[in-house]
Image: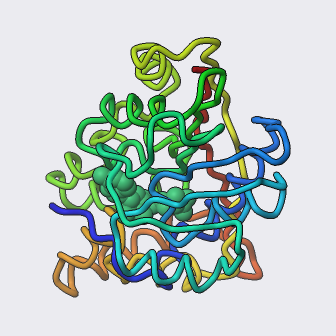
Amino acid sequence: MQDKWTDGEAYEMFVGRWSRRVGEQFLSWLNPPKHASWLDLGCGTGALTAQILKHCNPRSVIGVEPSEGFLLLARDQVGDKRAAFRQGDGENIPVADGEVDIAVSGLVLNFIPDQQNAVNELARSVSEGGTVAAYVWDYAGHAQFIRYFWDAAIELDSSAREKHEGVRFPSCRPEPLRTLFVAAGLHDVVTEAIDIPTPFTNFDDYWLPFLSGIGPAPGYCASLDETARNSIKDNLKITLPTDEDGMILLAARAWAVRGTR
Ligand SMILES: C[S@@+](CC[C@H](N)C(=O)[O-])C[C@H]1O[C@@H](n2cnc3c(N)ncnc32)[C@H](O)[C@@H]1O
């Protein structure tokens, strides 16, 4: 199944709104110098780029992203002359050797077929002494809004197990991330858990983004017939921890990793 990254507005409702929150904490953990030049690989709709501009006083940010649809929204939403966007791929990043001081990537590495090549490319992009850092969802652990969906899907269809992102993306754990960074020649490599609240105002706020087809879980959901989709929906209505006022209070963990060139 090919993951679909086309409709930026739909992505914002599904993950962009949470990536902004993780991004803010991630940047605070990085504690970067001001006036640095940045690369944001797989910038999508600009969630992390926007946080860099807001919190880090950068000299410049280059957002690199393969999806035209996402780039359109990123350009439209970010609107800051320090930011520039280039269409490109993580395995052949369209920047010169050592072009930036800091290269980051939010929720992207696991989607790149050759992840080692991508981390090598990030390392190539930064100057000597520069920083490479990334975060990915803790799919197999505490990315609760995604896990609840897959747990419900597997209960009804055991073949969904191989599509579960916790199974598909074994690198989204601290040790594999560390190994990728060390193998790229980076030093002082450390990992960190970043936990954010992901409150959903009601069931629709949780469920409707799964109908968009954007990203792995919505892609799987869109591939089902209506009866199967409704079975997952009914299961989730029972399993999701829902307050009397309809609020669904979940949390999500991302694993962050950083290293120095
Ligand atoms: C979950 S989204 C993350 C977007 C954004 N960084 C954020 O934090 O909201 C995954 C992104 O990875 C991008 N992507 C997928 N394959 C890629 C590749 N080979 N190289 C670079 N980016 C890729 C997708 O187009 C999508 O924008």
Horizontal side, residue 87 vs residue 26: left or right: left
Horizontal side, residue 212 vs residue 43: left or right: left
Quarter of the image where one finds residue 79: bottom right
Horizontal side, residue 113 vs residue 178: left or right: left
- Using the image, determine if residue 214 lies above or below residue 25: below
Image x and y of residue 43, in percent: 51, 61
Image x and y of residue 116, in percent: 32, 28
Kindly identify the residue that appears in the image at 82 percent across and 42 percent down.
Answer: 28
Image x and y of residue 139, in percent: 45, 44
- Using the image, determine if residue 67 lies above or below residue 117: below
Can residue 149 be seen here? The reply is no
- Using the image, determine if residue 235 lies above or below residue 152: below
- Using the image, determine if residue 193 lies above or below residue 247: above
- Seen from the viewer's position, the closer of residues 149 and 78 is 78
- Seen from the viewer's position, the closer of residues 249 and 255 is 255
Total numbered circles: 0
Kindly identify the residue that appears in the image at 16 percent across and 83 percent down.
Answer: 225
Can residue 129 be seen here? The reply is yes
Question: Which of the image's four quarters has the C terminus?
Answer: top right
Quarter of the image where one finds residue 68: bottom left
Image x and y of residue 46, in percent: 58, 68
Kindly identify the residue that appears in the image at 66 percent across and 77 percent down.
Answer: 78
Quarter of the image where one finds residue 194: top right
Ligand 1 positioned in quadrant? bottom left
